[in-house]
Image (cartoon, rainbow, N blue to C red):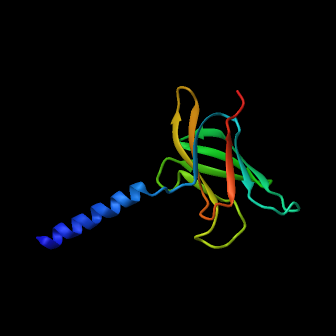
């Protein structure tokens, strides 16, 4: 009995610690109409003037059919096309922001397809950005109306 109580106490402490820990450095929610471009501006903290320090991540959706959303993304002038659906792990795309190869030190953006309102024809997209080394500063721009 005491082992069960001890185990449940340790699990409770672990869950309460995880809630207090901040998982994402930046996060934002976009409500996008069809072909409206959402922009995420990424400024790299660098003192070298020769290195480009400002990048933009642009994305928009073009089609919603059969519970699938077609997402067009552009980062560092590389266009990408994704098909997202509301199933777990198929509702998101991960975009590497900086060129380092370390898994724990990688800066990346996670674009998640959260919801679609068929009446208003609006897709809700969440953007989460992780950068453990604090090398970037991020600004979110809403699409023009």
In this rendering, the answer to whether 1 lies above or below 49 is below
- Drawn side of residue 114 relative to residue 78, left or right: left
- Drawn side of residue 22 relative to residue 101, left or right: left
Furthest toward the left, the residue is 1
Q: Which residue lies at the image location 87% right of the left edge and 60% below the top edge? A: 49
- Drawn side of residue 50 relative to residue 77, left or right: right
Quadrant containing the C terminus is top right
In this rendering, the answer to whether 142 lies above or below 91 is above
Q: Which residue lies at the image location 61% right of the left edge and 50% below the top edge? A: 83
Q: How many marks?
A: 0
- Drawn side of residue 10 relative to residue 32, left or right: left
Can residue 127 be seen here? no
Query: x, y (%) of residue 31?
Result: 59, 35
Q: Which residue lies at the image location 20% right of the left edge and 69% below the top edge? A: 6
Quadrant containing the N terminus is bottom left
Furthest toward the front, the residue is 47
In this rendering, the answer to whether 112 lies above or below 105 is above
The image quarter in which residue 76 lies: bottom right
Query: x, y (%) of residue 12?
Result: 28, 61
Task: Pick the residue in front: 75 or 82.
Answer: 75
Can residue 36 be seen here? yes
């Amino acid at each position: 009995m005491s082992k069960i109580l001890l185990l449940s106490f340790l699990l409770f402490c672990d869950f309460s610690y995880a809630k207090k820990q901040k998982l994402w450095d930046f996060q934002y929610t976009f409500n996008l109409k069809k072909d409206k471009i959402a922009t995420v501006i990424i400024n790299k903290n660098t003192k070298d003037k020769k290195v480009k320090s400002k990048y933009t991540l642009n994305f928009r959706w073009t089609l919603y059919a059969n519970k699938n959303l077609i997402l067009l993304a552009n980062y560092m002038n590389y266009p990408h096309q994704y098909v997202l659906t509301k199933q777990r792990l198929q509702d998101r795309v991960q975009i590497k922001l900086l060129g380092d190869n370390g898994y724990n030190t990688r800066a990346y953006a996670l674009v998640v397809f959260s919801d679609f309102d068929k009446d208003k024809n609006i897709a809700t997209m969440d953007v989460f950005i992780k950068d453990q080394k604090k090398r970037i500063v991020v600004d979110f721009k809403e699409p023009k109306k």
